[in-house]
Amino acid sequence: MQSISYERARDVPHALQLGRDPGTKFIGGGTNLLDLYKSGIEQPLRLVDVSRLDLSGIGQLPDGALRIGATATNTAAANHPLVRERYRLLSDALLNGASAQLRNMATVGGNLLQRTRCYYFTDPTLGPCNKRTPGAGCAALDGFNRIHAILGASAHCIAVNPSDMAVALVALDAVVRIAQPGGERALPVLDFHRLPDERPQDDTVIAPGELITAIDLPPPRFTNTHYLKVRDRASYAFALVSVAAAVDFDDGVVRDARVVLGGVAHKPWRAFAAEDTLRGQALAAPVLERASEAAVEHARPLAHNGFKVELARRAIERALRTAGGMA
Ligand code: SF4
């Protein structure tokens, strides 16, 4: 094991200054990074601890939006009164993730950056992985690909993003704020994660040395929401398929909707076609059926995950039924 240095950042400018050095990784709760370090998948030369920066606050902004600091723990975010009252979808998604102990340590910034749990990525003894070693090949393509992608995959990687939180954030039109030398940028969480194409080593669009400082949630836009997670066991398991459903009704008719899938793609998958199908309609069984079919129309299942297509379809219908008070 190579040696590694550790430094605690005093403030954001100090963190950005330290983050300029190649081989530096920011560490918050460390629940994913340290696992990957111990198995040799992440090999930082220096860890810069950002967990004690003044970035853990959760509070309302003047325009009614809610800002969640990047180092707020998953537990703090899930249980915050404003999150529970106004963004129940996010609270439920967070509480569906990991275990209580992990949620107590993991930060929301780290949650956005957590890496895939593809077996071939996390266990180097199982075979080559383009995400771990670009150009090496992808053992999952012809391997056991039960948990892998049915949408948006490439010939270079078929991994899925493991976050529950990110699925809910996309449905809520959240924005991630990122500090960089010389300023800050903000982008929709929808655009934060990327599809694998020819660069599966890049999970997100964040550049080396940039630091997530906060997540902003716009004032609530949806009257009815539901997060549904389907997994192999009742807790401490990643989603086979998850759905964040958010609907805004106007006199019984869907004015606007979000349907976002987890566990099916390299990023939270916003089902735009399903949303288009719902707008202007009353939530009735035929509409739900058409919406769910539209969501998986372009699915490309692999040898071992064909079940995910039907599972996604049924999960979408059930999540929308529950959100709409039909269940
Ligand atoms: Fe690696 Fe992606 Fe292939 Fe998994 S699916 S082995 S993460 S390249």
Image: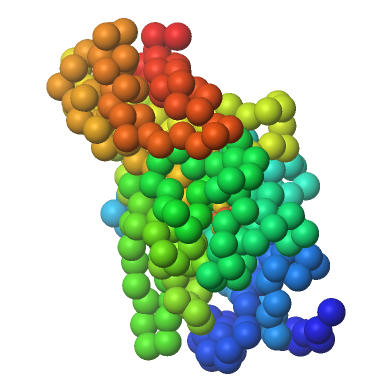
Is 200 above or below relative to 315?
Answer: below
Q: Quadrant of the N terminus?
A: bottom right
Q: Quadrant of residue 194?
A: bottom left
Ligand 1 image-quadrant field: bottom right
- Looking at this view, is 309 or 191 the one in front? 309
Q: Quadrant of residue 283?
A: top left
- Looking at this view, is 185 or 230 the one in front? 230
Q: Residue at image x 27%, y 18%? A: 290
- Looking at this view, is 295 or 92 the one in front? 295
Q: Residue at image x 54%, y 70%? A: 134
Find residue 37 and report its horizontal and vertical position in percent: 75, 69
Find residue 247 and report its horizontal and vertical position in percent: 31, 27
Q: Residue at image x 53%, y 90%? A: 20
Which residue is situated farthest in the left direction here? 280
Is 270 above or below relative to 215?
Answer: above
Q: Is residue 95 visible?
A: no
Q: How many marks?
A: 0
Could you tell whether 242 is left or right of 172 in the image?
Answer: right
Q: Residue at image x 38%, y 34%? A: 299
Q: Quadrant of the C terminus?
A: top left
